[in-house]
Image (cartoon, helix red, strand yellow):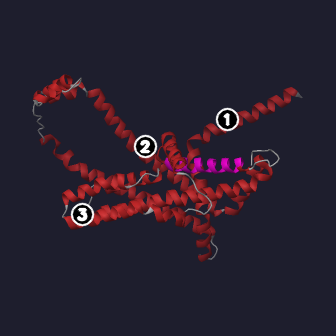
Amino acid sequence: MAMEAAIRIAVVAALVIWTYQIIRPFLMPLIWGVIIAIAVDPFIERCAKLLGNRRRLTAALFALVIMVTLVVPVVMLSTSSFQALQPYIKDIHKIHLTIPPPPKNVYGWPVIGPLVAKFWTMASHNLGAIVKQFEPQLKGIFLYLIGLVGGGFKAVFLFVISIITAAALLANAQKAASVTRRIICRFSGEKGPEIVALASATIRAVMLGVVGVAIIQSVLSAVGMIIMGVPLAGLWAVLVLVCAVMQLPPLLILGPVAGWAFMTYDTTPAVIFLIWCLVVSASDSFLKPLLMGRGVKIPMLVILLGALGGMMVSGIIGLFLGAVIVAISYELFLAWVAEVDESRPGCS
């Protein structure tokens, strides 16, 4: 009997490990899809009633709209970036870069002065030699930039998988919710329904109060920059989104852009754009109370750590997913700590 039990355990363990290895590349987008489905389920429910309780049609329209709003900005960002670089790529062979010799005071800089002056002098006489000398480093930087572009397209692909997963769950919401409750109750017993309710409330609070506000700020900043004709407006809007998710003020990105506007345009439009940037950056102060669920207060540090850690582990999707996962863990931990045995003196 012991041998038979060991064989069964080994077979089950092998199946679990094999299944995990197969789905591991898609694990993060699948989890993200579940989180999206839980966050937007009340909205989908209201929309489905307006469409005659056609929930599957509503879920399909939701996925279509989200994917269109995702693909269009990516295409715009790629197009604007290519158009901005095109003049330089076209005329690069015409450019004759000259570097003046270093000023005399450079030699007097402490520690690094002689080394900087040496390379500066070499570059002023023969820039090609410097480029050839640092060719491996320049090649590494170029490959790194290519990797960033490839990582961006990978993130878009994984996000599409997340949206498809969310749409499938939303189309069969009752069945998916029932299976989820059974799984959680299987592991946590009587506390299962409470854990499901707390996790759902936390997901909706973070998705609306953090991610939702970040998306709104990113869109508003993009609108202002497009109207002002800011080059690479899509890129700056993405950086605004990243800052907002990490609970950093979008003015870190919009401030330098506003400074560029003052150097490029007349005072009046530049001042109007600056006011717009200040409003966008401060909008989270009144948007969060409106969108974030009452009773669920996530500290800024928790969101920041989750966003940074998630981005380091899983890229741009991890930026959003990490904030949600860490917030759920934080709320569940607080709920567990709150269950104090009143019979223990000094613990309540």
Residue under pointer 3: 270
Q: Check residue 195 in the rendering and tell me which mark sits there, or answer none.
A: none
Query: On screen, 105 above or below 301?
Result: above
Q: Position of residue 147 (x, y in %)?
A: 39, 39
**Label 2 SS:** helix
In three-dimensional space, the C-alpha distance between marks 3 and 1, rounded to whole angstroms, equals 58 Å
| Mark 2 or 1, nearer chain start | 1
**Label 1 SS:** helix
In three-dimensional space, the C-alpha distance between marks 3 and 2, rounded to whole angstroms, equals 35 Å
Q: Position of residue 164 (x, y in %)?
A: 56, 56
Query: On screen, 6 above or below 233?
Result: above
**Relative horizontal placement of residue 276, taking residue 259 as reference (left or right):** right
| Mark 3 or 2, nearer chain start | 2
Q: Check residue 17 in the rendering and tell me which mark sits there, or answer none.
A: 1
Q: Nearer the viewer, residue 162 or 222?
A: 222
Q: Residue at x 55, y 47 (%)?
A: 302
**Label 3 SS:** helix
**Relative horizontal placement of residue 229, taking residue 192 as reference (left or right):** left
Q: Position of residue 70 (x, y in %)?
A: 44, 58
Residue type at numbered disc 3: Ala
Q: Check residue 151 in the rendering and tell me which mark sits there, or answer none.
A: 2
Q: Nearer the viewer, residue 95 or 237?
A: 237
What range is drawn magenta here?
A: 319-337
- Disc number lying in front (3 or 2): 3
- Residue 53 lies in quadrant: bottom right
**Relative horizontal placement of residue 199, taking residue 300 as reference (left or right):** right
